[in-house]
Image: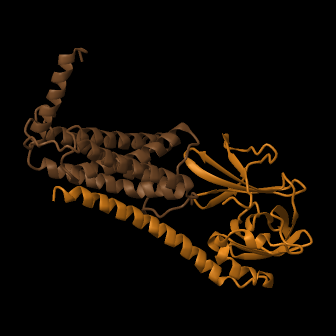
Chain colours: A orange, B brown
Amino acid sequence: MSKRGPLLTMLAVAILGLGLVGINMTGASTREQDTSGTVAPLGQATAPADPAAPGQAAGPAPAAAPEAGAFPAEVAYAGRTAGNEATIAIAVKDGKAVAYLCDGKQAEAWLQGTATGTALSLTGPDGAKLDGNLDNGAVFGRATAKGKEWAFSAATAKSPAGAYKGQVSVAGVTKRIGWTVLQDGTKTGLVSSDGRLSPAPDLDPVTRTATLDGVPVQVTPLTGGAQ
Amino acid sequence: MTGNYDGRYEEEQTVDISYVAGGGTSRMEVPPDTGRRIFVLFALGSLVSVLLGVYGGLHEPQLVSINVAGFSGPQAVKAWLTTLAFVLALVQLWSALVMWGRMPGMRTAPSWIGGLHRWSGRLAVLATVPVAVHCLYALGFQHSDGRVLAHSLIGCLFYGAFVVKMLALSRPGTPSWTLPVVGGVVFTALTGLWVTASLWFFTTFGLKF
C-alpha cells in the first residue's frame, strides 16, 4: 500500500488530466462535425479536391504539378463576399492554404485546407468552410461561417494585403485577433476572447504593430505554410 | 556553517540521523546504485516538465475549455481551485514537519498524521488538474509578461516535481534528502502558482466566485 499509493495517485492525476483533455478534444471535433454535416455541399468545383484532402500528408508534390492556371507555389488573395458582408484573405503555399474570413462585427473564421490544381478547399471550426476555384488569377467560390453562406471573389494580393493574426494577453486574459487587409487598404478585424467577439484595434500592416488596451500585440502575417 | 572541515562533516551526520529518527524506520543499507536511481527519478520528472511545456507551446490555444459550473467564469474557478490546493499544501507542509519531528511541541507524530499527509496531498494535486488542463488546452505556454512566463514555467516544474516525489515515495533506497527537497520544491512551486495566478486574480478583480 505504502509503495503503490503514490503510483496510484499519479495514475489518478494522469487519468483525470487526460480525461479532461479528451473531453475537450472530442467536444471540439463533434462541434465541428455536427455543424459541417448540416451544411449543404458547396461549389461543384470542390469535388475533385475532396478526395485529395485526406492525402494531405502525401506532401505538396501534387499541387506542384505543372497545370495551366494552377496555384503558384506561394500566393495570396484578398477579397469580399458578393454582398460585401465580409472580407476574406487567403494564403497559399506549396499546396496548403489558410484563410481568414471576417465581417468586423459578429462573424469570423480561421480556415485551413488544400490548394490542388485550381481548386481550394478549406475548413475551420464550427462548420466554417471555404471552397473556391482559381480563374485567371482570382479565386471565386463560396464561404460558410456562423451558419451563413456567401459567394465571394478574391483577387491576387500583394503585401501588405493579406490576413494577419495577433495574440495578446490583457489583464491575464488571452485574446486572439484577426485582420484582413485588402489591396485598397481596407482593414477588417475582430478580437476573440473566450468565445466572445469584439472590435479589433487598428493594425499597421507594414510594421505589423497593434495595441489592445495599451498592450502591444504580437502580429504575424498568415502564410499558407503556417498553421 | 563555520567553514571548518570537521564542522561540515558533523552537519552531514546530523542530517542523516534526523532522517532515521524522523522516518521512523531503521537505517537502511544504501544500495550501490542510489546515484543512478535518483538520476532516473529526476530524469523522468524533467521529462514530464518539458513535455508539458512543449505541449503548451505547440498546441494552438483554443481559448475555451470545459469547466466547473457555478462560478462567474473560468478564471474564478481556477483561482479558487488553486486556492484550495494551496490551503491543502499548507496542511502538507505542517503534517510533513510533524512526521519528521520538526514541529515544536509535537515531537512524536500521531498515528493519523501519515493518512492526513497522503490524502491532503492527493486532493491538492487533483484540485490542480482541471486548472492545469484549462491552462494548457485553452491558453498554452505563454511569455507575454513576467507573471505569465513565471506561471508557465512554475506550472511545468510543479508536475515534474510531483512525479519525482511520487516515484521517490514508491521505491525505497533514495537518498535521505530526496523527500524533503522534492516535497519542498512541490510546495514552493504550488505557492508560486497560487501567487502568480489566484493572488493576482483576487487582487486585480476582487474576491469573486
Residue placed furthest toward the right: A136
Residue B27 versus residue B12 in the image, above or below: below
What percent of the width, then of the height, locates residue B26?
A: 7, 42
Q: Is residue A185 visible?
A: yes
Where's residue A207, x and y in %? 79, 43
Can you say which quadrant of the picture contains the C terminus of chain A?
Answer: bottom right
In this picture, residue B182 sits left or right of residue B196: left
**Quarter assignment of residue B185:** top left
Image position of B180 with respect to A189: above or below: above
Direction front: furthest residue: B32
Report the label total: 0
**For the point 36% across and 51% down, which residue is it?**
B44
Tell me which residue sits at (57%, 39%) in the image.
Answer: B145
Q: Is residue A142 visible?
A: no
**Residue under the point 31% across and 48% down:** B41
Q: Position of residue B18 (x, y in %)?
A: 13, 33
Depth check, front residue: A36 or B47: B47
Residue B165: x, y in percent?
28, 48
Judged left or right of residue B63, residue B17 is: left
The quarter of the rendered structure image containing the N terminus of chain A is bottom left
Residue at figure coordinates x 15%, y 49% from the top left: B114
Q: From the viewer's perspective, is A100 left or right of B57?
A: right
Indicate whether A201 appears above or below A137. Answer: above
Observer-nearest of A33 and A68: A68
